[in-house]
Image (tube, rainbow, N blue to C red):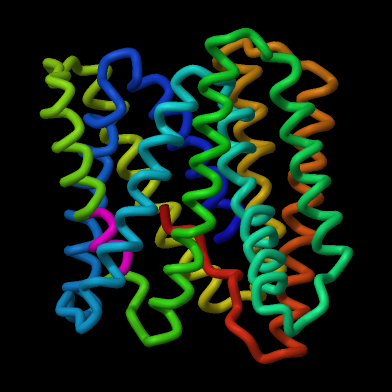
């Protein structure tokens, strides 16, 4: 399930990159949210899960951070090699490790794990290697936007963890996130005045992006429900490998040794950070931040 989910997320990235030739970022986010809303609404109804929630505020803030991260990510991969854009977004595990370090420093009651610091530094070195081969002005801007999307994704995942701890069903969380994406995308499109007429090719790309994203969400959520979190967190990085293959085969993106080395460093840093967070959770009984990616 996890391998299929990562493949579908990479496929979604391909569809988004191709759809950007016909549609703006707001439109892609809007249609992606609409498709997810319809599918998750049907799924929760079939499962008998109520959409009524007692914590609308938590869903609101989760949607704000998640939708903003999604918009920035879609925008970044429209101007970056697909594998580069996905790697920058996958920095979220490293950012969460940095948040843990910051929390430990602010509280002052626990010693900062040097290994966790090392994973953060390795992640940033990896990003520097990824961006170095594409240092021209236009791609650097997209790279910084992709990096910011990873920060906001980390914040969204922590909020998902909080929702899970109070017993909110995954389907309900994804449903309200899809609602937020649809509304935010529509608002952004209206403000920018960038509604475009549909073409057969463009509409098919939008449909494929929405279906692949929703399918990936369901598979990943199910994998985390029945599998081992650390195994799933590690397999999650297969998405970068799939995206790299797509980049080379479909978009003729150049293969630079520094980019490949940077991707490997981000993957290793992310897996190490996940293992250290899980070990910390096992020792302290604190919240588990290895929550499923449900973007």
Q: In terms of secondary structure, what is the magenta stretch mainly?
A: helix
- Quadrant housing the N terminus: bottom right
Over which residues does the magenta segment extend? 173-178
Q: Position of residue 212 (x, y in %)?
A: 39, 44
Q: Is residue 78 magenta?
A: no
Q: Depth check: 223 or 78 in front? A: 78
The structure residue drawn at horizontal position 24% and vertical position 71%, both measured from the top left corner, is 57
Query: Which quadrant of the view contains residue 86?
Result: top right
Relative to 75, say whether 160 is above or below: below
Number of labelled discs?
0
Q: Where is residue 154 in the image (x, y as percent from the top left)?
A: 53, 56
Relative to 269, say whether 278 is above or below: below
Q: In this view, does 156 lie to the left or right of 283?
A: left
Query: Which quadrant of the view contains residue 257?
Result: top right
The structure residue drawn at horizontal position 41% and vertical position 52%, both measured from the top left corner, is 295
Relative to 85, say whether 180 is above or below: below
Query: Which quadrant of the view contains residue 82?
Result: top right
The structure residue drawn at horizontal position 66% and vertical position 27%, both measured from the top left corner, is 245
The structure residue drawn at horizontal position 56% and vertical position 42%, both measured from the top left corner, is 89
Q: Is residue 177 magenta?
A: yes
Q: Position of residue 81 (x, y in %)?
A: 59, 20
């Amino acid at each position: 399930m996890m391998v299929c989910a990562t493949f579908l997320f990479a496929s979604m990235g391909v569809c988004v990159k191709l759809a950007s030739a016909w549609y703006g970022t707001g439109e892609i986010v809007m249609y992606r949210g609409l498709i997810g809303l319809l599918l998750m609404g049907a799924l929760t109804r079939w499962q008998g899960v109520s959409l009524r929630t007692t914590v609308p505020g938590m869903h609101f803030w989760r949607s704000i951070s998640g939708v903003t991260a999604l918009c920035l990510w879609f925008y970044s991969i429209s101007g970056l090699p697909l594998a580069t854009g996905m790697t920058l977004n996958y920095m979220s595990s490293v950012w969460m490790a940095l948040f843990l370090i910051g929390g430990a420093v602010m509280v002052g009651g626990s010693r900062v794990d040097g290994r966790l610091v090392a994973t953060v530094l390795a992640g940033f070195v990896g990003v520097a290697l990824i961006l170095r081969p594409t240092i021209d002005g236009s791609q650097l801007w997209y790279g910084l936007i992709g990096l910011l999307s990873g920060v906001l994704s980390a914040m969204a995942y922590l909020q998902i963890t909080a929702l899970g701890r109070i017993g909110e069903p995954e389907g309900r969380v994804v449903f309200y996130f899809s609602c937020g994406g649809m509304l935010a995308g529509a608002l952004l499109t209206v403000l920018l005045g960038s509604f475009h007429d549909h073409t057969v090719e463009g509409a098919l790309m939008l449909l494929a992006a929405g279906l692949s994203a929703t399918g990936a969400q369901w598979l990943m959520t199910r994998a985390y429900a029945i599998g081992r979190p650390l195994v799933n967190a590690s397999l999650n990085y297969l998405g970068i490998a799939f995206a790299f293959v797509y980049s080379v085969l479909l978009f003729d993106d150049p293969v630079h040794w520094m980019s490949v080395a940077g991707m490997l460093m981000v993957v290793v840093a992310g897996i190490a950070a996940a293992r250290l967070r899980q070990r910390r959770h096992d020792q302290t009984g604190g919240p588990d931040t290895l929550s499923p990616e449900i973007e």
